[in-house]
Amino acid sequence: MILLNSTPIKTMTINKLVAQTRTCRRFTGSPITTSTLMNLIELARLSGSARNGQPWQYSIINDQQSCCDIFPHLGWAGYLADWKGPAPEERPTAYILCLLNHDRLNVAEKHAHFDLGIASQNILLGACEQHILGCRIGAFSPEITRTFNIPDNLTLELIIALGEPKEKIVIEEAKDKNDIQYWRDTDQIHHVPKRPLKELLVTLERTTD
């Protein structure tokens, strides 16, 4: 079991940085500067991209009113059915909107979402290094698009909510193959079961002619 604390991790190895980069859904309310968010977008810019098509663009949101406008359209924690999302004082203080530019899809369209996985993970790793955690949100109401004037060639595909973490997160080994649902205990510590390493490894035998 790995208990993830809230201490700065500037000097951590990549192994510890990845372990600390968890999904967080409750935040302290501390603001995030535009320059910090720009640095995270730079990490996305440097990400690998299929055939170097680079079809993703990003919009930074960190003003209070826009954050308030975005929040009601978001879905939070599907496994926590009775939880409607963070309280007002625990909500994200910044968002990164991930937008697919359809004018750039002629190079490697079927790989675009692989690119987004790489880019969004780079963003979250960089955020964690700055003592910021986030939550990738794909469950949002189409009504959110009315909040912004989004050009016709761009489609909003993912929202990354960000903030200084308030909750504690524990990684633990899954008890069996069906033990994949995250949960919270009575102290509101968030538990995330992960399959053991041996279940991820597959031995493949060579075929014979």
Image: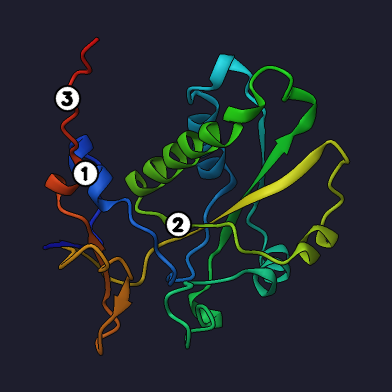
Q: Looking at the image, can residue 12 be seen?
A: no
Describe residue 145's horizontal placement relative to residue 176 as left or right.
right
Q: Residue at horizontal 58%, vertical 15%?
A: 52
Spatial CA span between label 1 and label 2: 25 Å
Q: Where's residue 80, x and y in %?
A: 43, 80
Describe residue 159's horizontal placement relative to residue 183 as left or right.
right
Mark 3 or mark 1: whose residue is earlier in sequence: 1
Q: Please name the amino acid that badge 3 sits on.
A: Glu
38 or 72, nearer to the observer: 72
Q: Where's residue 185, x and y in %?
A: 25, 84
In the picture, which quadrant includes the N terminus?
bottom left
Q: Please name the amino acid that badge 2 sits on.
A: Gly
Residue at image mark 1: 200
Q: Residue at horizontal 88%, vertical 41%?
A: 152
Disc number placed over residue 134 in the picture, else none: 2
Q: Residues within 10 Å of mark 3 (few under 14, many from 20)?
A: few
Mark 1 or mark 2: whose residue is earlier in sequence: 2
Describe residue 66's horizontal placement relative to residue 18 as left or right.
right
* Element type where label 1 sits in the image: helix
Residue at image mark 3: 205
Residue 27 sits in quarter: bottom left
Q: Residue at horizontal 43%, vertical 71%?
A: 28
Spatial CA span between label 3 and label 1: 16 Å
